[in-house]
Image: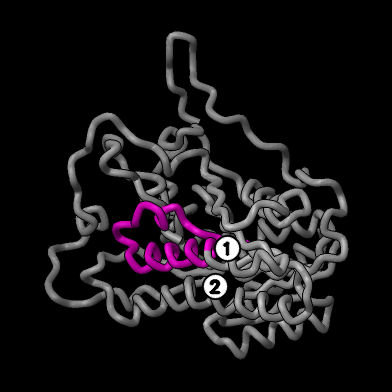
Amino acid sequence: MTNHDTENGALPGLPAPPPLGATALPPGTYDGTVVLVTGGGTGLGKAVAAEFARLGADLVIASRKEDRLGAARDELAALGGRVTAAVCDIRDAERVAEVFDAAQEAYGLPGVLVNNAAANFPVPAEDMSPNAWRSVVDITLTGTFLMTREFGRRHLAAGTPGSVIDIGASYAWTGGPGFAHSAAAKAGVKSLVETLAVEWGPYGIQVNGLVPGLMPHDDMTADIRGNLDPARDKDSRQPALRVGLPRELGWAATFLASPYARFITGHTLVVDGANWQRRGLVSPPVVTVREQMGRAAFDGRSTADQHPASDRRPGSEERPTSPRTPPPGPPPSPRTPPGSPPR
């Protein structure tokens, strides 16, 4: 952590959380509950799944890439619960239904759905191809809807309660220059949270959102790691004077879906140490998105398709030059909000 000298010494920042393995809820809170986590094979999705496992849940983790699932399944099963892994492209409604069928056959109808899978990569809007736009929006927004719809339909038919948690991004409120596709999709996800909470509340189904801040982890892609490693003062750019830990997102998720949060629905909780709300007193010089990305002047050609969409979500919580973690330079003014990280 970078020290900030004051008359009374270094600023402390927000305290560190309890150690890995600690639980915020009573042991056994999720005994007998099936939890389905998309994008659960790596990164923050796996961290969220782990906290449900520690509290007794049976897990179903889904990912588009089978090679991510085997190791994650073994790691999560070591925490004590049962774990099933399923290959699933959440854009495919038929495959989504098959995954729910398999989960229901193995353990029972999932009582909690965590929509963590998404896609993202940085690109100026003028460079973005139609395919790049569709890839990110279809995975992040349409895929989230298809998973949520399948969950809701089954609970409505069975007359049972349930809880949905959609992983969002703070630029759903602020916009995300350089991430127009992801920011638009995440704004749609936030709207889904608010809409479906009202539609399904009478049937006992909660729908909430959860937004991570900068939370480094071992599964970050090379481009994200390349941006993060040089940012040695990244802690000093957070109001908390530290980054988040993946388990802090998991603790928030287990609370939102727990019996202790039954009256919370339609809400999006931001877990980022107030970083997305940072404002400065002086406006920094304007640097275009192209300049920030090191791109030459626009020449009329689209280049976005060279960046494959991924359900690992190189996003908000991971990229230090994202809006949630502003690049080096004077802080933004109240008239130029920092936005939210790419998700």
Q: Answer left or right for 105 relative to 145.
A: right
Q: Answer left or right for 270 relative to 20.
A: left
Dominant secondary structure of the residues highlighted in magenta in the image:
helix
Name the secondary structure under disc 1: strand
Identify which residue, 199 or 277, lies in the foreground.
199
Identify which residue, 33 or 328, lies in the foreground.
33
Identify which residue, 6 or 197, lies in the foreground.
197
* Cα separation between marks 2 and 1: 8 Å
Which segment did they paint magenta?
165-194
Asked if the stretch drawn in magenta spans residue 79, the answer is: no
Identify which residue, 156 or 240, lies in the foreground.
156
Residue 332 quadrant: top left
Mark 1: amino acid: Asp
Asked if one can make out residue 72 in the rendered structure from this viewpoint, the answer is no
Question: Which residue: 75% across, 63% down?
Answer: 75
Question: Which residue: 32% across, 78% down?
Answer: 305
Could you say which disc has been placed on residue 166 in the image? 1
Compared with residue 113, is residue 282 higher up or lower down, i.e. above or below?
Answer: above
Could you say which disc has been placed on residue 144 in the image? 2
The spot of residue 287 in percent (x, y) is 19, 48
Compared with residue 179, is residue 105 higher up or lower down, i.e. above or below?
Answer: below
